[in-house]
Image: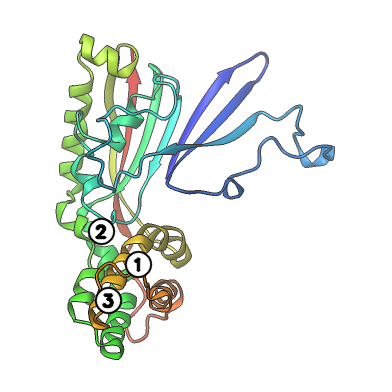
Amino acid sequence: MNSLHNLTPATPTHWINVFHALPGRYSLAELPTSPPGTPGQAAEGDDYFTCKVFDSAVPVLDYQESLESVPRTPRPVVPPSSINVSIVERYIPPTSAREFSELFQIKGRSLLVDRMVELSPRQGALLFIYPTKRGAQTFMRQYLSPILDPLLRSMCIINGFSVDLGSELGTMAAIDEMHSFETMSRRIQSLCQEMSPQSKENERSAGRRARYTLQFAAKEEVFLERKAWADNWWIKQEKPRVREVLSRYFRIARRMPTDSDVTPTNLIHEVLDGVSSRPYGRNPEPTSGVEVGVFVIRRTS
């Protein structure tokens, strides 16, 4: 999740612009309505003419996809040097290693770098929350696998799929590439130093001269609610991969041509619905939170 906040000074108040940076397709109905409908009752708060908070959505790259044809970072989604507060949150592992492999690279396709160049040089701050390798392993072991593994085993037996299906869908490849909290801290510090030199190249990429510092770093444990991690995060993130993998195994099991566009819709829904609502069964519900790194990066001129 990305949220970019821009506070525009006014007298005697402030207007707050909130930009929701969203990848892929999204519905505006999912965002807060702003300005609110009018006429409104005084007791309900601000109406159209006195509203001070304005929400909008901006499209952003899906950094988990193959982006070889996309120009390298920086690719800001709002004007560089314009954001006062930026928030980036992830609590489950990405679906592929691509997002993480370039996260700390100034010349890659980096979610982190793109958000950093958007920060205002007047004490702009980025709150960056990302799971550690230990947290990602906890998510798989306690949250996802107890639900998904028995579902995939049953699906293989009933439909005659290879057991490789369970290995392919029951793992998340990015976990092996992820870092400990200590390594993430070191890499973010190095990235801040790399982006801070007062060079002409840095001025062009960031919009103006910049100095970045890692002001705060801590690891925390976050207990994830089933509805949040399953319905809002895992299913939306993994649905394309589930569809692709199940369609491939379905064609193999039914001896269909590789270019067939037939998809096992019921099987896809069985996996997604199972992750959403299947009981944990004999396995206990999660007893540990997911470890995440919490970092605050500050930009000054």
Residue toward you, 107 or 134: 107
What x and y, as percent, mark residue 19? Answer: 51, 34
As drawn, 1 above or below 197: below
Element class at badge 2: helix
Element class at badge 3: helix
Q: Are circles 2 and 1 on residues that touch, CB within 8 Å?
A: no
Could you say which disc has been placed on residue 136 in the image? Answer: 2
Q: Are circles 3 and 1 on residues that touch, CB within 8 Å?
A: no
Residue at the spot x=77%, y=34% of the render?
47
Relative placement, left or right, of 15 versus 133 is: right
Residue toward you, 262 or 121: 262
Classify residue 74 by image quadrant. Answer: top left
For discs 2 and 3, the disc positioned in front in the rendered view:
3
Along the polypeptide, which appears first: circle 3 or circle 1? 1
Q: Residues within 10 Å of mark 3 (few under 14, many from 20)?
A: some
Relative placement, left or right, of 261 versus 189 is: right
For discs 3 and 1, the disc positioned in front in the rendered view:
3
Q: Residues within 10 Å of mark 1 (few under 14, many from 20)?
A: some
Whether residue 297 is visible to the viewer of this picture, yes or no, is: no
Relative placement, left or right, of 23 versus 289 is: right
Residue at the spot x=75%, y=32% of the render?
48
CA gap between label 2 and label 1 equals: 23 Å
Classify residue 210 by image quadrant. Answer: top left
For discs 2 and 1, the disc positioned in front in the rendered view:
1
Q: Which residue is mark 1?
A: 243
Q: Amino acid at mark 1?
A: Arg
